Amino acid sequence: MSDEDEFAREEEEIAGAIPEAGWLGHWIDRFGLVFAIGIVLSMLILINEVVLRYVFNAPTIWAHETTIFLCGMAFVYGGLYCTARNRHIRVVLIYDSLPKQLLRVFNILISIICALASIIFAWASWLMVQRAAFRPDGSFRLERSGSAWDPVYPGLIKIFLFCVLAMMAVQFLVLAVNYARGRK
């Protein structure tokens, strides 16, 4: 691979989801903007809280839990976002020294192993969702925080975690298939 090809590949990865991620990766990448806005919104909420608390002596009961929820959602989504952009952690000492054909095999194996891990974690998060979203009689009721404001954020974040992990498993399978096909 020439330096120009490598530079073009790096620019492509910076610009968005890698081609091997398919249409799912494209949409995951695009939807990341929503969570970036959530981080900015949480900052604005905290600034509002500081002004209300220290200037007007009128603190809110909702600001801290809301910012924790918004940031938590962004951090959970970040794993899926990194998967679509091929920015997940790997041992580059070995990975970068492999020849192109062996690199393709490694990409397939890494994607399959990560898909299996994501499936296992999705199953574990589903067990959390069952306790956080359903009563013993089977009726739906989200777990609440137990604070003075008592939002349903704990239940929502567990459901979101399950959805993201399930989608991450699918994204890794898409990557494995597209690496096996040699798709660019």
Image (cartoon, rainbow, N blue to C red):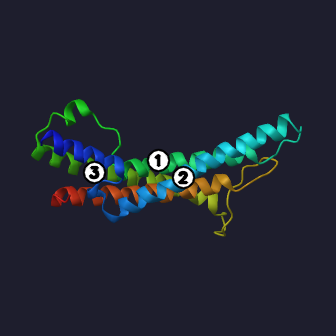
Answer whether residue 52 is visible to the viewer in this image: yes
Q: Residue at x 65, y 46 (%)?
A: 42
Q: Specify the amino acid type for callout 2.
A: Phe
Image location of residue 84, percent across then percent down: 36, 53
- Element marked by disc 2: helix
Can you tell which of label 2 and label 3 is closer to the viewer?
2
Residue of label 2: 35
Sort mark 2 into few (<14), some (14-19) or many (20+) by Cα contacts within 10 Å.
some
Residue of label 1: 78
Left/right of residue 76 with respect to residue 89 in the rendered view:
right
**Which residue in the rendered view is the most extreme toward the front?**
4
- Work out whether residue 34 or residue 109 is closer to the camera in this orientation and state it: 34
- Work out whether residue 155 or residue 136 is closer to the camera in this orientation and state it: 155
**Distance between mark 3 and mark 1 Cα atoms:** 17 Å
Sort mark 3 into few (<14), some (14-19) or many (20+) by Cα contacts within 10 Å.
many
Q: Are marks 1 and 2 in contact (CB under 8 Å)?
A: yes
User: Does label 1 or label 2 sit earlier along the sequence?
Assistant: 2
Image location of residue 11, percent across then percent down: 29, 46
User: In what quadrant of the picture does the C terminus appear?
Assistant: bottom left
Image location of residue 141, percent across then percent down: 69, 64
Image location of residue 33, percent across then percent down: 50, 54
User: In what quadrant of the picture does the N terminus appear?
Assistant: top left
Residue of label 3: 111
Q: Residue at x 36, y 59 (%)?
A: 25
Left/right of residue 180 with respect to residue 168 in the rendered view:
left
User: Does label 2 or label 3 sit earlier along the sequence?
Assistant: 2
**Distance between mark 1 and mark 2 Cα atoms:** 9 Å
- Element marked by disc 1: helix
**Which residue in the rendered view is the most extreme toward the top?**
93
**Distance between mark 2 and mark 3 Cα atoms:** 25 Å
Q: Specify the amino acid type for callout 3.
A: Ser
- Element marked by disc 3: helix
